[in-house]
Image (cartoon, rainbow, N blue to C red):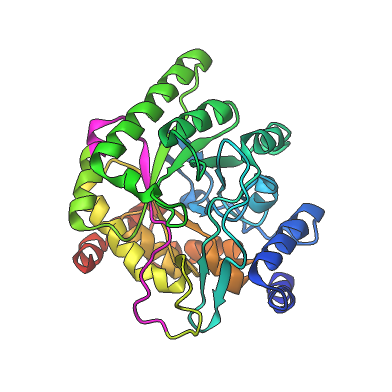
């Protein structure tokens, strides 16, 4: 009850500010403890091992919220089973000119063109080294906008954070860094994965610890583009995919701000991202871990991602509208869905609607 009240009052207050200011205030609220912890009771049916990591539940905070690794442990206290920080680039950069975040309240969506604004590796690494919590924190790495060698920026990310990351995500799918999505093309992707996984092998040999690497892809891929990514997944020792990032599409939107440039996230992304998720599951087979992202706003939408082929699920934009109690409500709701469907484990839901969603792609 208190969580729901805080969600309502918090949203009303934050919506008095522009989106980027509100985002900063929410980070400050987590830092100071103003945002209360609201985790759901642990349910062993929701726990599973994915890519060698034991996740207490399948719901994670997506990258983009905690860009500078300021509040990963506070996010975990909201009920998330894992949190992903970043995107982090080797050097600090301011990102694109403001304004660069827009709420589409009519559609419960967000458009952003932030452009990997972050404080760089050094600042985030210091914070992650100072963590006192032990929960799962992934590190999302990217390339500086003006980098002379973008692939080397990803290599630097693996080296910098290898001792503190539970897993890595190579983000090559943001639409807000010019040319970044070109890394999804097969030849470029082969070079990127070769370099990133080679340095991971070096670090693993030195440390005795193998940190999984995921690849985050766009929802705007053609079937041929998905074929190319699947082929490179098979050719390399990649640990999983994250499907998907924001979209450039604006189909069916009516909000006055729909024409703003940038990536669209939130409720309208659910169907498209879920269809691409299922299409990629069909291509890569049952064994490769996939994290589903895009438009998750409830336990039922989270479960639908899993039915479409996801092992784990991430969210971010829908919390803008649903409040910090959302992850806890989703986790509790997933337990209720397992009760309803008489399922012994969340894994029992996976792929049960794979064909339905793949047909939509």
* Residue 130 position in % (x across, y down): 73, 33
The majority secondary structure of the magenta stretch comes to: loop
Q: Is residue 14 left or right of residue 155?
A: right
Q: Is residue 239 left or right of residue 232?
A: right
Rendered-image quadrant of the N terminus = bottom right
Q: Is residue 275 left or right of residue 169?
A: left
Residue stretch in magenta: 232-253
Among the 4 quarters of the image, the one containing residue 16: bottom right
Among the 4 quarters of the image, the one containing residue 29: bottom right
Q: Which of the two residues, 115 or 204, is positioned nearer the viewer here?
A: 115
- Count up the numbered dots: 0
Q: Say whether residue 251 is magenta.
A: yes
Vertical comparison of 75 with 334: above or below: above
Furthest residue toward top: 206
Q: Say whether residue 269 is magenta.
A: no
Residue at 47% x, 57% y: name it: 176
Please say whether residue 290 is visible from this viewpoint.
Answer: no
Vertical comparison of 21 with 15: above or below: above
* Residue 108 position in % (x across, y down): 51, 77
Rendered-image quadrant of the C terminus = bottom left
* Residue 302 position in % (x across, y down): 44, 63
Among the 4 quarters of the image, the one containing residue 22: bottom right
Residue at 58% x, 53% y: name it: 95
Please say whether residue 276 is visible from this viewpoint.
Answer: yes
Q: Which of the two residues, 243 or 98, is positioned nearer the viewer here?
A: 98
Vertical comparison of 21 with 59: above or below: below
* Residue 98 position in % (x across, y down): 62, 64
Q: Which of the two residues, 176 or 108, is positioned nearer the viewer here?
A: 176
Residue at 43% x, 23% y: name it: 199
């Amino acid at each position: 009850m208190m969580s729901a009240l805080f969600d309502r009052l918090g949203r009303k207050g934050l919506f008095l500010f522009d989106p980027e200011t509100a985002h900063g205030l929410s980070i400050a609220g987590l830092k100071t403890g103003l945002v209360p912890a609201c985790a759901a009771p642990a349910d062993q049916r929701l726990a599973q091992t994915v890519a060698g990591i034991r996740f207490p539940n399948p719901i994670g905070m997506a990258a983009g919220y905690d860009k500078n690794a300021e509040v990963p442990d506070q996010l975990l206290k909201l009920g998330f089973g894992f949190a992903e920080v970043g995107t982090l680039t080797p050097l600090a950069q301011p990102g694109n000119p403001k304004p660069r975040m827009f709420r589409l309240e009519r559609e419960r969506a967000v458009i952003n063109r932030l452009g990997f604004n972050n404080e760089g590796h050094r600042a985030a690494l210091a914070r992650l080294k100072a963590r006192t919590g032990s929960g799962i924190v992934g590190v999302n790495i990217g390339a500086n906008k003006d980098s002379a060698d973008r692939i080397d920026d990803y290599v630097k990310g693996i080296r910098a954070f290898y001792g503190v990351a539970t897993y890595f995500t190579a983000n090559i799918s943001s639409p807000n860094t010019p040319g970044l999505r070109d890394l999804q093309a097969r030849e470029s992707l082969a070079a990127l994965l070769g370099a990133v996984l080679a340095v991971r092998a070096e670090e693993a040999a030195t440390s005795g610890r193998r940190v999984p690497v995921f690849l985050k892809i766009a929802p705007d891929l053609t079937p041929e583009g998905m074929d190319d990514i699947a082929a490179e997944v098979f050719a390399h020792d990649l640990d999983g995919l994250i499907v998907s990032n924001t979209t450039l599409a604006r189909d069916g939107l009516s909000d006055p701000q729909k024409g703003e440039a940038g990536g669209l996230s939130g409720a309208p992304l659910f169907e498209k991202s879920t269809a691409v998720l299922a299409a990629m599951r069909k291509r890569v087979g049952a064994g490769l871990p996939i994290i589903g992202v895009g438009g998750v706003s409830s336990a039922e939408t989270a479960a639908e991602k899993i039915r479409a082929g996801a092992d784990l699920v991430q969210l971010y934009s829908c919390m803008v509208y649903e409040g910090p109690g959302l992850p806890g409500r989703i986790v509790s709701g997933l337990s209720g869905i397992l009760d309803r469907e008489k399922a012994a484990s969340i894994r029992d839901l996976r792929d049960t609607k794979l064909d339905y969603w793949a047909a939509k792609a």
